[in-house]
Image (cartoon, rainbow, N blue to C red):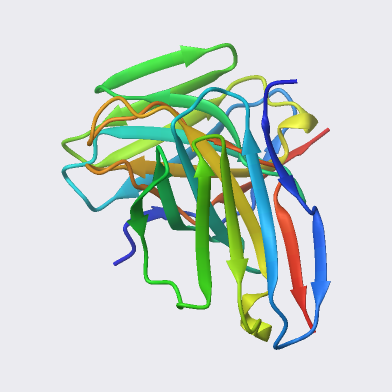
Amino acid sequence: QKEVEQNSGPLSVPEGAIASLNCTYSDRGSQSFFWYRQYSGKSPELIMSIYSNGDKEDGRFTAQLNKASQYVSLLIRDSQPSDSATYLCAVKAAGNKLTFGGGTRVLVKP
Amino acid sequence: DTAVSQTPKYLVTQMGNDKSIKCEQNLGHDTMYWYKQDSKKFLKIMFSYNNKELIINETVPNRFSPKSPDKAHLNLHINSLELGDSAVYFCASSQVISRTQSYEQYFGPGTRLTVT
């Protein structure tokens, strides 16, 4: 079982709709959770971090964390073509080691 | 601009050669990392240095040797390059709070290494 799992996609979303991305992790001791966006040929860019159960909103992005079920999700509201990218879920357990999922490719169609 | 920078951006070399990649951050962070992203886009940590001390050393061939002259610089030297070393190598940095906690990691632009 992979430590951090994501559906590879592509997740096709009409412009203006909500994109919903999910991520599950295996280490119950994980403490910090991050979402990175990576455009093709570019480096990962941090868009959200979440540390406690519940929702965290930042602009059009909402991260949701459920430690009991070991999943973290990302919602992108009012999706724009510029949101088309690969979204990487990253999980940090003790020791400051960040483990990444394989990424979900999102395509927003005008 | 404050950032994590890497040189070179592209590196094309032949099998058996030795090459180095350099990374510098001016964010004032005390911890730096090397990641490898393979052709399937899977991003995996290789090494981490905190204040010039190696703290993460994943299962990486001995041909890879990181060096951190100070907390703002982290270099990666690769000996006897192999075809399988072709990948994008990312440097990242963060500020560590404690042995088990740190702030977010910020990534450099990457170095695309092609071994022929």
Above or below A76: residue A38: below
* A107 on left or right of B42: right
Q: Residue at x 56, y 61 (%)?
A: B36
Number of marks present in the image shown: 0
Does residue A100 appear in this view?
Answer: no
Does residue B2 appear in this view?
Answer: yes
Q: Residue furthest bottom?
A: B16
Above or below B54: residue A54: above
Quadrant containing the N terminus of chain B is top right
Q: Residue at x 16, y 42 (%)?
A: A29
Which of the two residues, B54 or B4, is positioned nearer the viewer here? B54
* B91 on left or right of A25: right
Q: Quadrant of residue A36?
A: top right
Q: Residue furthest front?
A: B69
Q: Residue at x 27, y 30 (%)?
A: B101
Residue B94 placed where, x, y %? 46, 31
Q: Quadrant of residue B84?
A: bottom right
Quadrant containing the C terminus of chain B is bottom right
Q: Residue at x 68, y 44 (%)?
A: A43
Which of the two residues, B41 or A67, is positioned nearer the viewer here? B41
Residue B65 placed where, x, y %? 51, 66
Which of the two residues, A86 or B74, is positioned nearer the viewer here? B74
* A14 on left or right of A62: right
Residue B85 placed where, x, y %? 63, 76
Residue B108 placed where, x, y %? 66, 41
